[in-house]
């Protein structure tokens, strides 16, 4: 064992404890939302950003009672029985303000147009026919007071907080911000994440593949996951299997990034230098987890020249193990660094369309997807090197240690969308 390298822990650390250690480390490092840099961007450019301010409306939405459809604005009292006819006194399009509706008349009105004073219902045009006299309309259905009218402030009331800090902004949230007049938004700066891959056997796609070499898939997977998690990823290339080169790469990466992640080189082989390099350039918090796939995982920090720290997370080299540990461990850290706070995916409970008779002492995460019957079916090959199983799956089945599964039994289900961006519904006002 290399000098200064901590002994391998026994027993393996449970995932829940690892989550607690990560959360505590982020709090100790000052990586709370209030500590994140803030920038202002145009609302149309804020998709996927994390909101840094509460958004309160200065207007009512809608700003006036308006028609929910094309039809006729009426006084309900004028139409007590089906079949009555009324003359059309005016025409009101969206953006126009009509005159007061006089008793015994109606107004042609279009979706979104303000309801004229005196009117208290809108009849959709499909429930009308031309009247017997020119310029009249016959109403074929009973009329209810207030029907088809969208009331002032029905969607949003003036002064109401419509979006809260810590929310990742999706298309609907941008529309809400625009609907209350916000042309720009204050958002947290995206975290900067460096991605390193290790291994002398790795070759870039597009290059000839020598004997004993493999194409570097982890680089593309991890950069894609970083981007999907809302961070700015930077590819720092492949590091040779040499301790000095590994230390130099980590030292340079720490200076310009909030988080450094790597794949491979974190196990206990003679060519695995990353744990020793992290100890030399910073320190280790924990390593080796009780999960499958993903046991050889490392978390620690890297020291910068100014005395501050960058976080470090070393992922296994096997492609599926790298993919799964990113979703379970790296993504929550990126969420916290993005200003969302600490947030874990919320599992569902769905029936299994499979049998799993072989329990493991570790907590297992199986690649699965929903079938047409609403049950979960497994990919037939759950090997940690079978990356095609991750592309095939739309989520992970979370099995406790020593668990077996019989077909039809409920299991914990983590959808891929929830793993990448856990729901923030609980943060809404």
Image (spheres, rainbow, N blue to C red):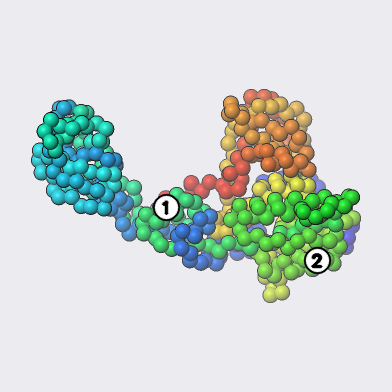
Viewer can see residue 167? no
Q: Nearer the viewer, mark 2 or mark 1?
A: 1
Q: Which residue is mark 2?
A: 247
How far separated are the C-alphas under marks 2 and 1? Answer: 47 Å
Q: Residue at x 20, y 36 (%)?
A: 145
Q: Secondary structure at mark 2?
A: helix
Q: Nearer the viewer, residue 394 or 288?
A: 394
Q: Is residue 65 above or below residue 278?
A: above
Q: Is residue 211 above or below residue 352?
A: below
Mark earlier in primary sequence (2, 1): 1
Tell me the quadrant of the picture where the N terminus can be found.
bottom right
Relative placement, left or right, of 385 versus 181 is: right
Which quadrant holds residue 87?
top left
Query: Looking at the image, which residue sits at the far left?
Result: 103
Q: Position of residue 45 (x, y in %)?
A: 49, 60
Out of 394 and 250, give the one closest to the viewer.
394
- Look at the image and tell me whether residue 29 can be seen: yes
Q: Looking at the image, which is closer to me, 153 or 182? A: 182
Q: Where residue 295 sits: x, y (%)?
A: 77, 46
**Where residue 43 sits in the image (x, y, percent)?**
45, 60
- Residue at the location (13% across, 30% down)? 132
Nearest the eye: 122 or 165: 122
Placement of 97 over or under 234, stated as above or below: above
**Circle 2: is it few (<14), some (14-19), or many (20+) Cα within 10 Å?**
many
- 175 with respect to 189 (left or right): left
- Left or right? Give the position of 155 relative to 423: left
Residue 359, image x and y in percent?
Answer: 76, 32
Residue linked to disc 1:
175
Residue beneath the point at 25% across and 35% down: 125
Q: Residue at x 26, y 36 (%)?
A: 124
- Which mark is drawn over residue 357? none
Could you tell me which secondary element the residue under label 1 belongs to? helix
């Amino acid at each position: 064992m290399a000098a200064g390298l901590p002994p391998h822990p026994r027993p393996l650390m449970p995932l829940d404890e690892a989550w607690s250690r990560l959360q505590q480390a982020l709090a100790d490092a000052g990586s709370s939302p209030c500590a994140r840099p803030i920038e202002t961007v145009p609302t149309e450019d804020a998709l996927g950003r994390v909101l840094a301010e509460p958004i309160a409306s200065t207007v009512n939405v809608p700003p006036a009672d308006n028609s929910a459809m094309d039809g006729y604005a009426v006084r309900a009292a004028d139409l007590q029985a089906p079949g009555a006819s009324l003359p059309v006194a005016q025409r009101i399009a969206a953006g126009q303000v009509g005159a007061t509706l006089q008793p015994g008349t109606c107004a042609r009105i279009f979706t979104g147009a303000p309801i004229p004073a005196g009117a208290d219902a809108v009849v959709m045009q499909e429930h009308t026919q031309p009247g017997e006299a020119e310029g009249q309309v016959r109403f074929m259905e009973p009329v209810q007071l207030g029907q088809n009218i969208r009331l002032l402030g029905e969607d949003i009331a003036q002064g109401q907080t419509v979006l809260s800090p810590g929310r990742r902004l999706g298309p609907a949230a941008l529309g809400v911000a625009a609907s209350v007049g916000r042309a720009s938004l204050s958002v947290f700066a995206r975290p900067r994440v460096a991605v390193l891959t290790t291994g002398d056997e790795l070759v870039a796609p597009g290059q000839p593949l020598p004997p004993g070499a493999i194409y570097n898939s982890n680089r593309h997977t991890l950069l894609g996951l970083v981007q999907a998690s809302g961070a700015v990823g930077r590819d720092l290339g492949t590091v040779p299997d040499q301790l000095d080169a590994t230390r130099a790469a980590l030292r340079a990466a720490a200076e310009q990034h909030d988080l450094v992640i790597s794949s491979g080189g974190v196990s206990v082989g003679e060519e695995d230098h990353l744990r020793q390099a992290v100890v030399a350039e910073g320190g280790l918090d924990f390593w080796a987890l009780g999960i499958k796939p993903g046991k050889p995982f490392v978390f620690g920090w890297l020291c910068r020249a100014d005395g501050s720290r960058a976080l470090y997370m070393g992922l296994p080299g096997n492609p599926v193990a790298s993919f799964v540990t990113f979703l379970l461990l790296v993504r929550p850290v990126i969420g916290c660094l993005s200003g969302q706070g600490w947030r874990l995916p919320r599992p569902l409970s769905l029936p299994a369309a499979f049998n799993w008779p072989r329990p493991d002492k570790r907590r297992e995460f199986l690649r699965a997807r929903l079938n047409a019957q609403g049950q979960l079916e497994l990919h037939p090959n759950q090997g940690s090197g079978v990356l095609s199983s991750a592309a095939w799956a739309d989520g992970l089945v979370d099995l406790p240690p020593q668990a077996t599964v019989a077909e039809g039994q409920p299991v914990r289900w983590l959808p891929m969308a929830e793993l990448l961006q856990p729901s923030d519904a609980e943060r809404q006002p």
